[in-house]
Amino acid sequence: MADSLHINNRAKAQNTYDAIVIGSGISGGWAAKELCDHGLKTLVLERGRDVKHIKDYPTTTMDIWEFPHRTRLTTKLSQENPIADSCYAFDEATQHFFVKDKEHPYIQEKPFDWIRGYQVGGKSLIWARQTQRWSKYDFEGPARDGFAVDWPIRYEDLAPWYSHVEKFAGISGNKDGVETLPDGEFLPPWEMNCPEKHIQEKILAKYKDRYVVQGRCAHLTKPNDVHLQQGRGQCQARNICYRGCPFGGYFSSNSSTLPWAFKTGNLTLRPDSVVHSIMYDEKTNKAIGVKVIDAHSKQELEYYARIIFVNAACLNSNLVLLNSVSNRFPNGLGNDNGLLGKYIAFHNYRGNINASIEGFEDKIDYGRRPTAVMMPNFRNVYKQEMDFLRGYMVHYSAGRGRMGDTSEGASIGGAWKDSLTEPAPYWNVFMMMQGETIPKASNEVKLSKDKKDDWGVPLLVANVDYDANDEKLLKDFLQQGSEMLEAAGCKNINAFDNGRRPGNDIHEMGGVRMGKDPKTSLLNKWNQLHSCSNVFVTDGACMVSTGTQNPSLTFMALTARAANHAVDELKKGNL
Ligand SMILES: Cc1cc2nc3c(=O)[nH]c(=O)nc-3n(C[C@H](O)[C@H](O)[C@H](O)COP(=O)(O)OP(=O)(O)OC[C@H]3O[C@@H](n4cnc5c(N)ncnc54)[C@H](O)[C@@H]3O)c2cc1C
Ligand code: SF4
């Protein structure tokens, strides 16, 4: 089949592929895998440097005392990178996988933390790997509640593709039978510790409308054949995954989709290739390829293909499309309705609660489990009942620190060192919210009119903020979370607004949303631009709404679905 799909244009032959994928992160890796599996000669263009699995994880086996600053950032590094440093995962051991503020500036019309990883693998190397399916209530939300536009798909459309990606990526979890957080194709779950189980029991006893389940995450608790074929092994529960995992214990493009795609013989990966724009041909009404700036030589190159997958991560995908101007599309590729870049949304992470719990002093925690406990959204699920739209997911965990880390231990000298070997006198509990934000036209990204980056690409301007709904959601979580912890017998409950800026959740979505109507959306139900059908956008940019779940599993499923549709359409001669 592959041969019939190849373009045989001699003049451009060297730079011509069946498919081009822009970006090699979580979604780009999936596009590459699916397209290569179906025999398409696929070029993945990645703006960052190459990162080879295992070989390029320089800190992965280092012990804390081997770092000059015990993994902490120097003041200089921290001050030079206020944006990157706002991300909890940015430290001395991981900083090489994060974009440094000065190297890739953008314009914040309103404060917005744009956390990026420009390298082969993108943010798949540094994500926290929490992975939950959306439920039918999430897809039905915008139509029922009258915001954004109706999703052109429903849970049933995506369910088989969730299964497809879960089996390959390896997702651990428990079959909980909860309608608002559908079960997946799970590897064995991690275990809750005793205080977590206790809190679960108390919440379930008091609130009949709430569920408390073990976290689901992209870790190989018990690898299957397909994972061993990828060269990956069982997770060792070290929880220093942000440095890259030499066991391939967690899912990343580098350990999973990209090596798989390479094995087909159909993948060409070109790192250090900044995609400037997508080239459009007015005669055929199709995209014909992409313009690339070599990251080092700044040489301009062109690559051609019959289909193009845009997977540069939400805001960069918006940027590439906005910068792809032609006579037909003066405001950006596919932007007939002027909505490209608008309706950006994210997750509201502002609510945190700290507490302590007594009664488990004879227990200690063991191992470094890479997930926490999850409570699917319980607000406005079956009908609108609160004075705000939508709701929030809750994550909580309990841990027992060391005496020396508490105010009750000595704080200096030998006594402090000794107290570091003693377990703390109580367990700490931490709870956080993951709230749905409502997409709106005023939350937008656009191109700077006069400022460009070192590769001649206009800088991104971010104009994204919270609104009154987010404030109400936050207030409700702080009340409900405190009440739940109190019901569980927790003490010293401290509920607070952590003041995190938009973007700091690292779940940016929207700007190129899907929809049924080309007047109000950019993409159709297969993630194709309504007005340029051989361009597919399958990362967070395509999202109509945000749900309350961690989003990347949904990006993977949407990507696999769209890639398989693209292959079918190519076979039928429709693209
Ligand atoms: C610390 C942290 C924790 C997270 N935790 C979770 C979690 O627990 N669960 C979850 O679901 N999500 C989580 N996320 C979010 C998750 O990482 C993203 O949703 C996911 O990586 C998005 O996949 P992507 O393919 O769209 O983008 P990425 O993985 O970021 O990949 C995009 C790639 O495109 C490249 N690129 C950008 N512009 C261009 C261009 N012009 N030309 C060529 N290449 C380009 C980039 O260099 C990058 O490699 C977390 C993120 C971070 C940083
Ligand atoms: S916890 Fe598991 S996935 Fe993370 S670094 Fe350790 S072995 Fe790898």
Image (spheres, rainbow, N blue to C red):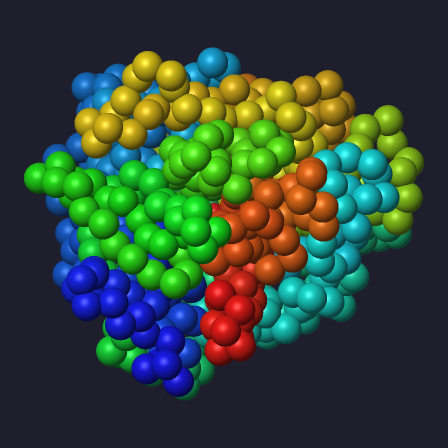
Q: Is any part of residue 362 visible from this angle? A: no
Give whichever of 109, 372 is nearer the camera.
Answer: 109
Write the residue at 76% across / 46% down. Answer: 150
Give whichever of 447, 486 is nearer the camera.
Answer: 447
Can you give x and y, in whole percent of width and height, for residue 27 in the image?
Answer: 44, 56
Write the residue at 69% across / 66% down. Answer: 157
In this view, 157 is above or below 415: below
Can you give x and y, in whole percent of width and height, for residue 318 in the image?
Answer: 46, 37
In this view, 154 is above or below 441: below
Q: Tell me if 353 is positioned left or right of 468 in this view.
A: left
Can you give x and y, in whole percent of width and height, for residue 131 in the image?
Answer: 55, 57
Q: Quadrant of residue 108?
A: top left
**Residue furthest front as drawn:** 283
Q: Is any part of residue 40 visible from this angle? A: yes
Count of number-bearing discs: 0
Q: Tell me if 169 is positioned left or right of 125 in this view.
A: right
Q: Quadrant of the N terminus?
A: bottom left
Write the residue at 63% across / 48% down. Answer: 514
Can you give x and y, in whole percent of width and height, for residue 569 in the image?
Answer: 53, 71
Write the residue at 29% across / 29% down. Answer: 457
Give whichever of 417, 279 is nearer the camera.
Answer: 279
**Residue furthest left as drawn:** 297
